[in-house]
Structures are given as C-alpha cells and as structure tokens.
Image (spheres, helix red, strand yellow):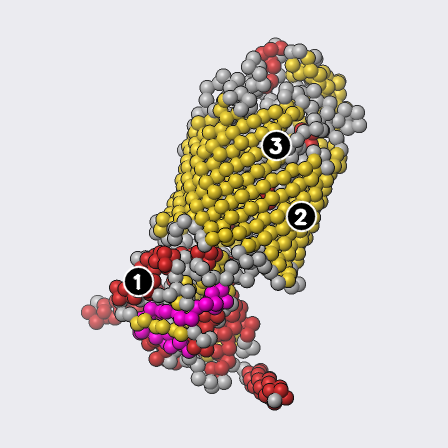
Amino acid sequence: MYLKKLLKIFVFVAFFCVTALADDALLANANFKITVFYPDVRKPYSDFFKTIISGIKEQSNQSIHLQIIDKSTNESDIFESLQQNKPDVVILLGGNFKPLQDKIAASYNTIHGATFFNNKDALNGRVGISMDPEPAQLFTELIKIHPAIKKIHVVFEANSNGWLIQRAAQAAKNKGLILVSHEASSTQQAALIYRELARNNNHSENALWLLHHDPTLDTKSLLPRILADAWKYKQVVISSNPSHVRRGALLSLLPDNQKIGQDLALVANNMLNGQKINIEPMRTSLVVANIRTAKHLSGTIRLQQKNNFALTYPRKNN
Amino acid sequence: MKKSQAWLLLTIVCSIYTSAYALEENGNSLVEAYGEEEFLYIATGRKQTVSQAPAVASIISAKTIRQMGARDIDEVLETVPGLHVSYDAGGYNPIYQIRGITSSFNPQVLMLINGVPITNIFTGNRSQAWGGMPVENISRIEVIRGPGSALYGADAFAGTINIITKNSTEIDGFEIGASAGSFDEYRGWLQYGGSLAGWKTAFSAQVLDTHGQHEKIDADLQTALDTGFGTSASLAPGSLNLGRQSLDTRIDISKDNWQIRLGYQGRRHGETGAGLFQALDPAGEADADRYNADITYLNNNFSENWDFKAQYSFFNTVTKTDLVLLPPGAFAGAGVFPDGVIGEPDVYERHNRIDLSAFYTGFQNHDLRIGGGFHHQDQYKIEEKKNFDTILTMFGPVLIPKGSVEDVTNTMPFNQEKTRKIYYGFVQDAWDFAPDWTLTAGLRYDHYSDFGNTFNPRLALVWQTSYRLTSKLLYGRSFRAPSFAEQFNINNPVALGNPDLDPETIDTYEIAFDYTATDDLKIGFNVFYYKMADIIRFNPTTAENTGKQTGHGVELEANWKATKKLSFYGNYAYQSSEDKDSHSDVANAPTQQLYLRTNYELTPIWSVNSQINHVRDRKRTSIDLRPEIDDYTVVNLTLRAREFAPGFEFAVSARNLFDEDTREPSEGPASPISPVSIPNDLPLAGRGLFVELRKSFN
C-alpha cells in the first residue's frame, strides 16, 4: 500500500519533470517574438510597469520588444510598428485604451495585463492576467488568521464579475468553504444585502468578501457604511482591493508586479504552445492586514506586525 | 474648401486627438488599481518595522519633505506639532524645543539615524559643529514627542527624532540634482539605488556650500564690555556669520539577513553665528568629522515565534574649533587682547555599541519584546589652545591675557579624557487583555559606570473606542544622562563640571485620540502633563541637579485630502511650562504654534505647496526685563514640475516669502543686574529664493 503510494508520487513527479523539460525544449528551440506595449506614466507609477516588464523578461526566453505608448503615439504608429516587428504575441499593459486594444487583439495574439476584466471580456475570449487577486489565495489567507470561517458572502453584479465569482465558488469548495454569492444589479439593492449580511449572520463563521471593481460597490457612500457596520457587528471583511484594508477591512492582497510579469510570460508561452488560455486573476503572496480590525474581531488569530505581512495598518503618516 | 474636405479634415483632427487622448494613461487609474500610492513601494520590497510602544508620534515621509521644498532637516522638524526649532547664538546650532523643554545645548532631545544615536557625549547634543543635515537621502523622519527612555535609553527625554535613510528600493537607479539660491547657497547630490554583486546597494553623497544668511546683530556682548571698559572693540552692528561647507555620504548594503551601513558627515569652515560668547566672530570656524558604521543581523523567523536582531555600531566624532571669542581690542577685566580672546578647543570621541533584541509572539494575547546591550563612550582626546586664563572675582569672570596663544592641552585643558560604560536590558509586553483593549508595559534598566542605575518604565493603554476612534492613555519616565561637559569641565571657573551628577528625569502623562472622521480626514489630539526633576544647571558656576519644571499642553493635528489633487495638513500646539525654582513661566519656547500646509496638484506635472507657520507668545526669564519677543508668521511657497521631460524635475521655492522679521530669543541676563549680551535677539533669514533641478537615470 505504502509502496504503491510512493510509486504514484514518483510517476507524478516524473511526468511533471518530463512535461516541464519538453516545454522548455520546445520553447528553447523556438524563436518567437513578443512585443510589450506599456503606457508612459510618471513616477512612481512607471515603476509598476517596469517591474512587470522585468518579470516578463525574467520568465521568458523569447525575443522581447518593448514599446512605450505616450501622448504623441497614435494608432497608425502602433500598427506600423506591429507590421514591422511581426510579433507572435503582443502583451498590452494598462487598461485605458480599450478600442485600440480590441483592434490589436483582432489581428494579433494578444495578452492583457495590469488591467481589470469583466464578463464580456471573458466571453469575447480576451486573454490576460487581471489585477483582481486570485480568490483561492485570498481565502487561504483568511482561513490562516480566522480558521472558524465556513461561509464567505459576496455581493456582485453578474455582468462585471460573474467570471470571477464562478472561479471563486470552485476555489472556496476546494478549501471546504461555501461561497454564498448575492447578485445585485444596483447600489441600492447591494446596500440592502450588505445590511442584512451585517445584521443577520453568525459572524464567527461567516465572512464578507468585497470585490475590487464592482458597479454596485460605491466607495464614497456605501463602503464606509459597510465597514462601519462590520465594526459594529464584528463582521469579518476581506477584500480584493488592498485600499479597503486601510479603511478597516481585515485583509487583502497586494499585487506582486514581478510575479504578474512572470505569469504574463507564462501565458505567452502557453499561447505559443497552442494552449487555450483564459483570463486569470493575479497570483500574489503579499498580504496586507489591518491589525486594529484583527484586535477588534474575536476569533482572529493574533497578528504580529512582522514581515509575513507586506503591509499592516493602521499607519501614521502626515 | 469643399464641404466634404472640411469634414474629412475635421474627422482626421478628431481621430488624432481622440487617439492621443485615449492612449494617455494617468496615475489615477493606477491609484484605483492599487488604492494607495504607498502600495507601489511595498510591492518593491520595503520591509515593515516591528511595532513600537504606542506614543504620540509624527512621521514625515520623503514625499512630504520634497513637496514642501525643504533643504534641511530643521525645516521639516518645524512642521511637527509641539516642536519648534530655535537657535543658539553659538554657530546657530538648532534647539529642538519640544513641549516647552528647551536649553542652549539641547541635550534633552535624542536624535537617531536608522535607530542609532548620534549624540555627542561632550555636550549631549548633535555636536557643537552640527552644520545642519540635508534631506535628499531621508526616507522618513519619525518624531516621538514625550518619553522614549523605556526603549531608547538616555536622552529620549523631551522627544526622539529618528531619521530613516533611503534604501536601495527607494532610490530609483541613478539620481543627480543641484540647487542654488539666496545667501550664495549651492547644493548638489548624487544617489544610486540598485543591486551590485548580489547586494542591494544604496549610495548617497550630498554637498553644500553656503555663505549663510547675514542678518544684522545690533549689539553683542562686546558692546556691553565696550560700554563698561571704555573700549570700542565690538564688531556690532555687524552681520551674522553662517557660512559653511558640508559633505554627507552614506552607503547601505544588504543581503539576506545582513545589512551594513556606513556614513560620513564632514563639516568645514562652519562659521560662528552670533559667536560662542555672543560676540560677533567673523574669523572663528568649526570643523567636524563624524563617521558611523553599523552591521545588523535581522532574522524574522529566527525560530518559531521568535524574531531576532543583533547590531554592532560604531560612531566617531571629532569637533575642532578655532574661535575668536571676543574681538581684537577687547578688554575683559585684566588687560587688552590685541588679537582678540582666542580659544581653540577640540573634542574627539568614539562610541561602540552592541544591541540585541528579540520579539516573541508565542504567548496567547501577548507580544513580548526583550533586549539588552552594551555601550562604550570614549572621549579619547581633548586638545586646547588659548591666549587667556579665566578667574572669577567678586565682580564676575575676568579674562587675563597670556600674551600669545598657548597649547594648554597638558596643563589647563577645559575638559578631560574620560570613558563611560553602559549596560542595559529592557522588556516590553503588549497584552491584548480584552477585545479592543491593549496594555503595553515596558521597563528598561540602564547601568552607567559613573552615576549608577536608572529604571525607566512605560505604560500605554490603548482602547479602540469605535470604528473611527482610538483612545490612548500613556505614561512614561525618561532620563537624560549628564554630558561630559557637565561632569568633567575643569579650569573654567564659570562652568565647572561635577562628577557626582545624577541624570535629569521626566515623568510624562498623556491622553491621546486618533479620529478618522472620514476616509479623507484624520484628526489627532492629545493632552499632556510632564514633571521634570534634577535638572542640571550651573548653579551658579558648578553643575548641580537643582532645577524642577512642570508643563502641560495640548496638540491638535488634522490631515485632509480634500480632493485627489488638493490636500491640507495643519496643526496647533499649546504649552505652558513653569520653572519651579523661580515660579515663573519657562522662557524662550513658544506657548502657541500654528502650522498649515497645502499641496495642490495643478496638473500631472505642476504642483504648488504652501506653508504658513505662526509662532507666538515666547516669554522672557523672570530676571529678563526686555519686552516679550515679537510673534512671527512665515510663509513658504514651492512650485514644482515633475517629469516635465523624462526623468527631470524642477522646483522653485521661496522661504519667508513676505520677508517677515523673524527672531529667536537670545540668552537672557545671568543675573538681574547684568546686561543682556544680544539685546535684540537672534535674527532668522529674510526672504530667500531657491531653485532646484534633478534628473534620474534608470
């Protein structure tokens, strides 16, 4: 029995190694061209793209051509450059010029990065890494510091975040959790759901998950109410948006730009290998936590302000 | 033009415009993605620091420092509530007055660079040839008002200023910059942050050459002597002398758990301000060489539940002064000094420190911090040349000419070669004893080889009152170790050391509130009361633990991001302190301070920053009959253009824009019948204009 188990592991490891080697061999022999478009932004935001590009270069062994898009660039410049370089894959970083992105994606194998996606993007076959953190990782971090949680509630607008919720439901299931998704079509409807969730739940086993981008989550009026209620009723709130942690959510994940770059390169490799690619949330292990909230919530494992968090709140700055 | 052609042209123009506009990605969309600009830095690997005991603290970031156009750390510290930067006549060395606690050498404030004290043991301050500190290499400044001895040991008394320098991730590749402006001031800097041979490396060099502001002094000590003795030696009315040159370099390398830092601060031709004897001295100069090095091992996963940090640090500081204490032709009771009264005291000291600390998180609801260490202070050389002897008569001190400048190092030096050993240990526990309640208790024990033992406790009760409000009740005891000048001054009948001195002590009680009114408006408010004892004073000529002082006050600060482009920061501080010996208000420090700063991002490139600083109600000592010194309001304005060309930044800055007459109090009379040396106080700079240009390569 024991031997059989060992053999199984060996076969699995061997298979993994061979697959990896085959992939590497295939890619090493190929000479593909990747063009990366990234926007010209001022410091310190430019570091964000620089680090992503550094991640792409680190992971990829293809020939990489970088092209900055600034105010003086127009569509014809971009397409002229693409026709000259004839890239096998185009990586588009940033999300501010969708019509152009669509035009490029119509003619080239295109991967989108450093942006957010909606359901339509997923249905239209867009490929890329979203700035939404991987729900599975978010849930893992939640259970680490609040092990009693059994159910995670989320309020979402289906056209925007349906794809993410679908993925999150599976992730929750894999971890023995239940994702309770509440569909809402307006801020008013969402507000009522949030209020009910805050008042009517057993908060020792139920957590609330806030999405990074959802049209029903108004950050000016609704978010402060959600977080104030959460404090009042001792509701555990996690978020895909790290800035919510400053405002009082228990934890979130920060983008790991180098990793995003590496993952974009991996997606590019897979695409070149002819694999079917979808939209993926970003993977990161940079946790941001609110120590004050953790102290307020009973059942939270003590958070030490140590380096296992990338960032903790509250911070004092002027 | 045909109609169709016009349409075509319009369409082309529109499409070009639309394309160009559509391709423009601005920072705001990234802020939305990230939420906060600081996430950008975190994601690039800046480490978090272990939590300290709760305290009333302010943190000023590099970004704020740059926005306000500060050139020296004093300009930054002036913006902290309850902290006012005054100046001493001698060299215009800064006096960081915190909550009304002030003295001319200012040893009651502990300054640290990256957590390591830069205290000179001779006077207990940052050096008599301090010469300012440039800000380009500063990542942030953490200022704790109130007691810090339970953690930092000696001198964290009125407050603690910890300057954190930039590491490799905070300097983007290679940066150069220069600034120039009024008072013939020229600055230049060069910084590098990156990776070399697998080590994260940060390097910084900053130079300064300035003639300094040269406001007029109407009358000085020599003016009074001239009146008394019928001479005419005084150089007053005359200009202040504040020229100096400086070089600040730092190297910071780190790999895995190890970090090595080296630093050098050189000061040359540091002029004497209004003179060490409060007599103008255009010929005198002070030089300083200050070297520091530290090697730090930090392991956040030393073993389960344990963090561990070990640090060895070294600090060598040499201060050399060539002074003309009274000008040529001076008569000081017993003969004329044709070349002036010349004094050339030099002090050499070195400090070695070993500090160990660990953080334990294995107990339920407790965070335990323990540590200990050893500190060796060595004033290893004293040198002095002078052309006078001092005797004390019934009429006061009299200076007797020697005829020429003599080396008195081995015969009549002003101080002694001495060492001091310090052993210490501390323990601090943060105990979450109920939901929303944390009690932090700390105690530090220091054993000094000269004055013996001192215990300094700290208690902090923090209550997370509501979603938006945190309340704190704080108590702490701190001490200031006597300086070697206070302990070992000899051959100076006016200021004799006393080896039997005890440390000064202070007990401080604070109630503090942090209120987050909205996501964009934060308010801090605190009330404090302190009681100082055993204050060291030359009473009248020998240092003794005699003084007592109490004080109370409030500090209020608010930080408001009105819009994405417009932010305000303001603070108000009130303090009232009483000298228990004279039963009078403590002199010189402002009773009230008001500060307001606005930062407005006009466009993605242009921003404007304005500051208003109002200083009011500075009292005189009970025997000083001068009218109260005038209040003042200073306005500073900085216009900045970022990335106007790739990697370039430009700024133009006006300090004291409206050329307000601003003065800091000069020393009062020694006795009710003696004159004031500089009656019309110490003038600060009038309007100054400065331009800066920087370029980064990466």
Q: How far from the left and from the top, in percent, is residue B18?
A: 31, 66
- Identify the residue at horizontal 62%, vertical 57% (top origin): B307
Count every numbered label the image shows and give the total.
3
Residue B372 bears which disc, if any? 2
Secondary structure state at the residue bearing disc 1 = helix
Q: Tell me the quadrant of the picture where the N terminus of chain B can be found.
A: bottom left
Tell whether label 2 touches label 1 (CB within 8 Å).
no
Compared across the picture, whether A176 is left or right of B459 comes to left
Q: Main secondary structure of the magenta part?
A: helix
For disc 3, the marked residue is B504
- Of the residues shown, which amino acid type is indicated by label 2? Gly
Q: Chain of mark 2?
A: B
The reply to whether the C-beta atoms of the residues labelled 3 and 1 are less than 8 Å apart is no
- Circle 3/circle 2 CB separation < 8 Å: no
The chain holding disc 1 is A
Position of A147 relative to B142 (above/below):
below
Real-space Cα separation, disc 3 to disc 1, in angstroms = 57 Å
Give, as a three-letter code, the residue at label 3.
Glu
The mark nearer the N terminus, 3 or 2, is: 2
- How far across and down, in percent of the image, does residue A269 sit? 51, 80
Which numbered dot is residue A195? 1
Residue at screen point 41% across, 65% down: A204
What span is in magenta?
A141-170
